[in-house]
Amino acid sequence: MFSNLGGPHLIIILFIIILLFGAPKLPALARSLGQSMKIFRSEVSTKNGAASGTDAADGTTSTPAAPTENTAPGPTATSDTTGGDTRPSA
């Protein structure tokens, strides 16, 4: 796509960019573009790492945690066996 761009073409494009944004704003523009590219690359590598099951930071394989059974006692039903009335006493 950009293989047909030669030296004169790039100089013209650079001149147009300088006219549009101004010389004082170019360093800030380049810095923000670099930060955006860094964030984009890290997000792409994170998504690719998550899709393949490896952690992008250290290259280790991550496995999902095994489901655990809830063994905590739940609410128990107690009833009065003498009267048959299940309402709590006040």
Image: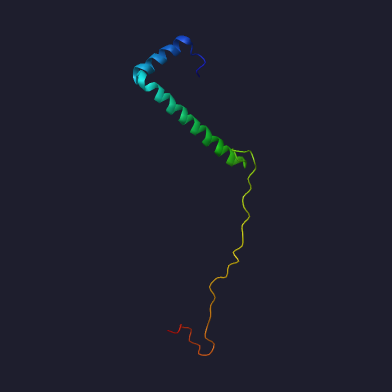
Residue 58, placed above or below residue 23: below
Q: Nearer the viewer, residue 60 or 85?
A: 60
- Picture residue at 58% right of the left edge, 41% below the top: 50
Residue reaching furthest bottom? 82
Residue 28, placed above or below residue 79: above
Q: Nearer the viewer, residue 62 or 58?
A: 58
- Picture residue at 50% right of the left edge, 31% below the top: 38
Residue reaching furthest top? 8
Colouring of the image? rainbow
Quarter of the image for the C terminus: give it.
bottom left
- Picture residue at 53% right of the left edge, 90% below the top: 82
- Give how far across and how far down residue 22 sits, in percent: 34, 19
- Give how far across and how far down residue 85 sits, in percent: 48, 86
- Give how far across and how far down residue 33 sits, in percent: 44, 27
- Give how far across and how far down residue 15 sits, in percent: 39, 14
Residue 50, placed above or below residue 37: below
Residue 87, placed above or below residue 39: below
Q: How many marks?
A: 0
Residue 52 found in image quarter: top right
Q: Nearer the viewer, residue 9 or 27?
A: 27
- Picture residue at 52% right of the left edge, 86% below the top: 80
**Residue 65 in the figure: left or right of residue 32:** right
